[in-house]
Image (cartoon, helix red, strand yellow):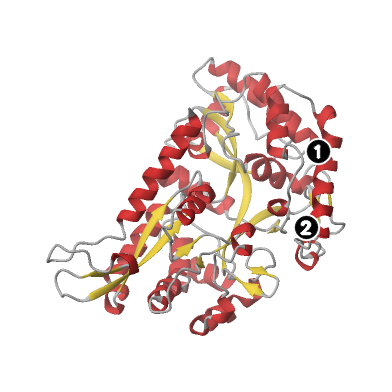
């Protein structure tokens, strides 16, 4: 049933998106719908519509407002209008479905989607002469596997996103908890205390397995500050999930003890965020953009706070933590040459210093360029959201390395499925871990043998560094 609902949602989204391509002229006839051209009803001026399919949820409203301002100002002067559509929960699937259906966006979030880049869905930005000043501006921050794929550039940097933890301070106080948990074992203890005290009114921990990035991002990436290495070791070119044993077992314990908001199997990431905002969840792992989520998208009307993700062991946080290194939009290959100038204008706006400063000034992103951060701090934030100063502190955070997971063809279950089954109690860590490691290492070797792995990207040395 869920699969049917998901498919229907994608179809509805496609119909909505496709509808944006048909604009009525004053005479009542379609005006070049296939090329994205419409007519301004007041001036009869041709307006080139640029279709941007976005995965942004946390600051969606703010970005929509800034796009509308640009559309009515500089964009109107240039005869360009950006039409933004958003899908948060199933972006990759929805984008691929659109493409297969022949509905092509002009701008899309493809920076982390190696399969789409290898399929040639995005243009090489090095080949677009009109944006080389932007390329030069971002040159110090370009990363292999994020912006670059070998000698091709598909996106420019957008932001750094540190991973931290949020908690409901009012629930903590009610439960007699005076400080955040220091380890994942202690977090599981806290979750049990909170759930028992809540007695159905609230639960200890918010989690989702419907979101297939949950174990990857909110468990493993979030705890590299304890391990110093990811599940794929870029220095050795090998997979090893063993460093994350205590994390996965703590998550399993919270589920099996009933300390998670019910049920992580049936709620995606945004509904789980909403449960926290409603005061129904005591703790969640959260990327920095969740400050915007809990202030604007799902306003939390209680005292909530930010802290470091708990350590795996009593040794504490030894290494620098991971900040997600996010790229900005790509220009898709389906943009016709006649429409490229309009798409470039939209692309330039989406990378303008003014927009980046606006987003940072409203607690939406943390740009790579320190000069922009300093300019905003000097001028003062337009809107400094609650907990932004703690959440945006990247003193002990570094950009993450890339991993070849998407390039592998596994002979068996992936880690998300295995970890979900461990959480459910259907299997154990001990029964699965050796086979899981072997499965990934075999698949990686096979991918290398087939020439699918660029070792200059995936086996580039990486060290998060220790905290000083």
Above or below residue 166? Residue 331 is: below
Depth check, front residue: 35 or 313:
35
Q: Position of residue 37 (x, y in %)?
A: 29, 70
Q: Name the quadrant containing residue 64.
A: bottom left
Left or right placement of residue 467 versus residue 127 in this view? right
Between the C-alphas of marks 2 and 1, the distance is 25 Å
Mark 1, other Cα within 10 Å: few <14 / some 14–19 / many ≥20 = many
In the picture of the structure, the residue carrying the numbered disc 1 is 436
Q: Name the quadrant containing residue 343.
A: bottom left
At x 50%, y 49%, the residue is 91
Above or below residue 101? Residue 196 is: above
Q: Position of residue 418 (x, y in %)?
A: 73, 33
Above or below residue 3? Residue 255 is: above
Tell me the SS state at disc 2. Answer: loop
Please state, as top left, top right, bottom left or bottom right, where the C terminus lies in the image. bottom right
Tell me if residue 308 can be seen: yes
The disc label shown at residue 464, or none: 2
At x 59%, y 67%, the residue is 368
Q: Name the quadrant containing residue 68.
A: bottom left
């Amino acid at each position: 049933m869920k699969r049917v609902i998901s498919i229907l949602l994608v179809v509805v989204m496609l119909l909505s998106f496709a509808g944006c391509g048909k604009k009525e002229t004053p005479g009542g006839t379609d005006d070049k719908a296939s090329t994205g051209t419409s007519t301004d009803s007041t001036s009869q001026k041709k307006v080139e519509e640029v279709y941007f399919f976005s995965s942004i949820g946390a600051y969606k409203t703010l970005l929509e407002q800034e796009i509308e301002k640009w559309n009515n100002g500089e964009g109107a002067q240039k005869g360009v209008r950006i039409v933004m559509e958003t899908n948060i929960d199933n972006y990759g699937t929805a984008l691929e479905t659109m493409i297969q259906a022949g509905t092509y966006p002009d701008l899309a979030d493809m920076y982390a989607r190696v399969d789409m880049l290898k399929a040639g869905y995005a243009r090489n930005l090095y080949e677009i002469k009109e944006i080389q000043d932007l390329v030069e501006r971002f040159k110090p921050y370009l990363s292999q596997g994020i912006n670059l794929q070998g000698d091709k550039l598909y996106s420019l940097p957008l932001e750094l996103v540190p991973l931290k933890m949020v908690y409901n301070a009012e629930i903590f106080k009610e439960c007699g908890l005076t400080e955040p948990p220091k380890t994942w074992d202690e977090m599981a203890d806290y979750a049990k205390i909170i759930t028992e005290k809540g007695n159905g009114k609230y639960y200890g921990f918010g989690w989702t397995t419907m979101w297939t990035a949950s174990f990857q991002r909110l468990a493993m990436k979030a705890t590299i500050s304890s391990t110093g290495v990811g599940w794929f070791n870029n220095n050795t070119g090998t997979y090893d999930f063993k460093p994350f044993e205590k994390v996965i077992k703590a998550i399993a314990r919270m589920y099996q003890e009933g300390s998670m908001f019910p049920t992580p199997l049936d709620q995606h990431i945004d509904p789980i965020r909403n449960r926290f905002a409603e005061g129904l969840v005591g703790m969640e792992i959260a990327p920095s953009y969740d400050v915007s989520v809990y202030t604007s998208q799902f306003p939390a009307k209680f005292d909530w706070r930010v802290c470091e993700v708990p350590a795996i062991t009593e040794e504490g946080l030894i290494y620098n933590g991971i900040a997600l290194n996010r790229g900005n939009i790509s220009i898709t290959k389906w943009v016709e040459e006649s429409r490229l100038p309009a798409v470039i204008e939209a692309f330039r706006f989406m990378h303008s210093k003014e927009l980046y400063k606006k987003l940072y000034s409203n607690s939406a992103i943390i740009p790579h360029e320190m000069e922009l951060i300093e300019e905003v701090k000097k001028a003062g934030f337009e809107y400094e959201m609650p907990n932004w100063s703690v959440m945006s502190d990247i003193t002990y955070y570094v950009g993450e390395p890339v991993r070849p997971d998407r390039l592998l063809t596994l002979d068996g279950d992936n880690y998300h499925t295995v970890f979900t089954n461990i959480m459910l109690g259907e299997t154990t860590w001990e029964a699965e871990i050796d086979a899981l490691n072997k499965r990934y290492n075999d698949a990686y070797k096979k991918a290398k043998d087939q020439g699918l792995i660029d070792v200059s990207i995936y086996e580039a040395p990486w060290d998060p560094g220790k905290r000083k």
